[in-house]
Amino acid sequence: MKARVYVTLKNGVLDPQGKAIHHALQGLGFQGINDVRAGKLIELDVAKGVSDSDIEDMCRKLLANTVIENFRIEREAAA
Amino acid sequence: MKSAVIVFPGSNCDRDLAVALEQVSGTKTAMVWHRDTELPEGIDLVAIPGGFSYGDYLRSGAMAANSPIMRSIKEAADRGVSVLGVCNGFQILTEAGLLPGALMRNAELNFVCRDAPLKVENSQSAFTSRYAAGEEIAIPVAHHDGNYTADEETLDRLEGEGRIVFRYRAPVNGSARDIAGIINDKGNVLGMMPHPERVVEAAHGSTDGRRLFEGLLDALG
């Protein structure tokens, strides 16, 4: 079973990489971009018994640094 | 002073740190592999070196912070054993929760490698007793992720409690309040981005970092 963990910077935390991407897009002539924030997507392939709270635990202990990052878990519906 | 340098896969300042410690203390420093679970008996100082542990995968220091040896280091820090983290060592200490805040990608996104003029803000710690408060020194930095970040409340607390030990005299990497190094509330854990082990003898061009190790020797015997 697939689970996706989205790790994003918290609001208010400056994102130098997002800013650089923003500038690069503007440099390419793309208009109307208000802001860019860069994050991570981590895909997990987990056994059926792994609960959401198990994955939250993984996020808090390793996958995200909760000082600066938020995380969101999405599970793929069982086939 | 019985010291140990922790070696992770990807550490690259471990030997420099050991040489600095051995030169100043005149005693052998133990090199401890990150998969070991115990620190040497009677240890006074644990030094976590610079480098790119685990290739900086996920986040700088994130993997190393969960290495087997870290449990012993946390226990030792709780007992009052001194812990010094330099560069990647600082990143590991924040990831492990031994120091507050986090070190993000440098604001200008560049790898910064040069001498950084610093101000010694607190000369009361075991790490800085050989410096004068307000003294200006220069210690080299070499990092990509040295942009110190914490919430305002944490920054105010660090400031109020004199826990900002070193501050950049001019912005280097976007660090909040130009923080270059901080200590924990008990004062026995220091994390700093500049590399004091790179300026300990005349041949290095400066000895500004040497007094940090001499201060530790004073404090730890």
Image (tube, coloured by chain):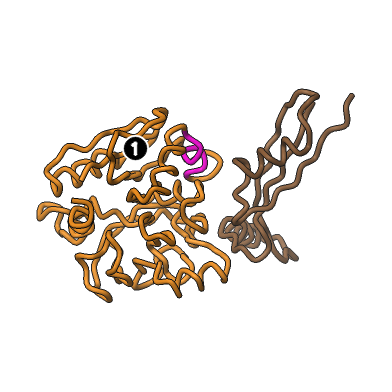
Residue at mark 1: B6
- Rendering coords of residue B49 (x, y %): 33, 44
Judge from the rendering whether residue A47 lies leftward or rightward of residue B145; answer left or right. right
Q: What amino acid is at disc 1? A: Ile
Q: How many marks?
A: 1
- Chain ID for label 1? B
- Rendering coords of residue B98 (x, y %): 47, 51
What is the letter of the orange chain? B
Who's the residue at 36% across and 38% down the image?
Answer: B11
Comparing B89 with B183, the one in front is: B183
Colour given to chain A in the rendered image = brown
- Rendering coords of residue B68 (x, y %): 46, 32
- Rendering coords of residue B24 (x, y %): 14, 49
Judge from the rendering whether residue B105 lies leftward or rightward of residue A12; answer left or right. left
Q: Is the residue B204 above or below the residue B67 in the image?
A: below
The stretch of residues the image draws in magenta is: B61-67
